[in-house]
Image (cartoon, rainbow, N blue to C red):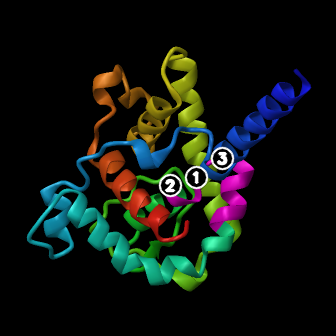
Amino acid sequence: MSALWLLLGLLALTDSSESRDGGCYGNIQTLDTPGASCGIGRRHGLTYCGVRASERLAEIDLPHLLKYQPIMRTVGQKYCVDPAVIAGVLSRESLRGRVPINMGMPINIPQDTNAFAPTSWISESQVSQMTNVLTSTIKEIQRTFPTWTPTQYLRGGLCAYGRGSGFIRSSQDLSCDFCNDVLARAKYFKRHGF
């Protein structure tokens, strides 16, 4: 009987550490997403869209974001957000390795703006502020829709990230371009060590 309790205890520890490493908002590897819209692909000079476009844009940003992987891990652990999701948001908010100057504010910057600074200026404080905005939005979604799953909270938080939590009125609002693109990029980053 005690061996059974020991086994159950070990399984519980394994589950909680996996949740901590991946974040509190579902396993992004199991999420389906259509990826970037064709408009996002065209905006970045691609002739294709979907997951393929998201992965190509993530691939372009990967060398720049690898420098900040330790920061993303630290911030991810602090806010219980998968570092790959943080990398996905940073990649989506960036323009070929350049990040908005006023990052960390409630971001509502059009992607075609020229207000960008070199990625070498990204600080832990900026990544923390950006992640705090995301988790605050997720928590608003949780209060509004208490019966949803962690995955729905993540999708809702990502869709409301730049538009505010009022943008989400039902589960039908959980498939926005920002969310679909970020999740596809995050899955790419997850496969590459984030």
**Up-down relation of residue 112 to residue 129 (above or below):** below
Judging by the rendered image, the residue that carries numbered circle 2 is 85
Task: Name the spot of residue 44 as percent of width and height, x first.
Answer: 21, 73
SS state under label 2: helix
- Answer whether residue 82 is visible to the viewer in this image: yes
Compute the Cα span from label 2 to label 3. 15 Å
* Crowd band around label 2 with a 10 angstrom C-alpha radius: few (<14), some (14–19), many (20+): many
The numbered disc on residue 60 is: none
* Crowd band around label 3 with a 10 angstrom C-alpha radius: few (<14), some (14–19), many (20+): few
Residue furthest right in the image: 2
Task: Name the spot of residue 140 as percent of width and height, x first.
Answer: 56, 28
Mark 3, mark 1: which one is toward the viewer? 3
Q: Nearer the viewer, residue 154 or 118?
A: 154
- Disc 2 to disc 1: CB gap under 8 Å: yes
The answer to which of marks 2 and 3 sits earlier in the sequence is 3
Judging by the rendered image, the residue that carries numbered circle 3 is 18
Judging by the rendered image, the residue that carries numbered circle 1 is 82
Q: Amino acid at mark 2?
A: Val
Q: Amino acid at mark 3?
A: Glu
**Up-down relation of residue 72 to residue 98 (above or below):** above
Of helix, strand and loop, which mostly describes the magenta segment?
Answer: helix
The quadrant in which the C terminus is found is bottom right
The answer to which of marks 3 and 1 sits earlier in the sequence is 3
Q: Amino acid at mark 1?
A: Asp
Report the span colored magenta.
Answer: 72-85
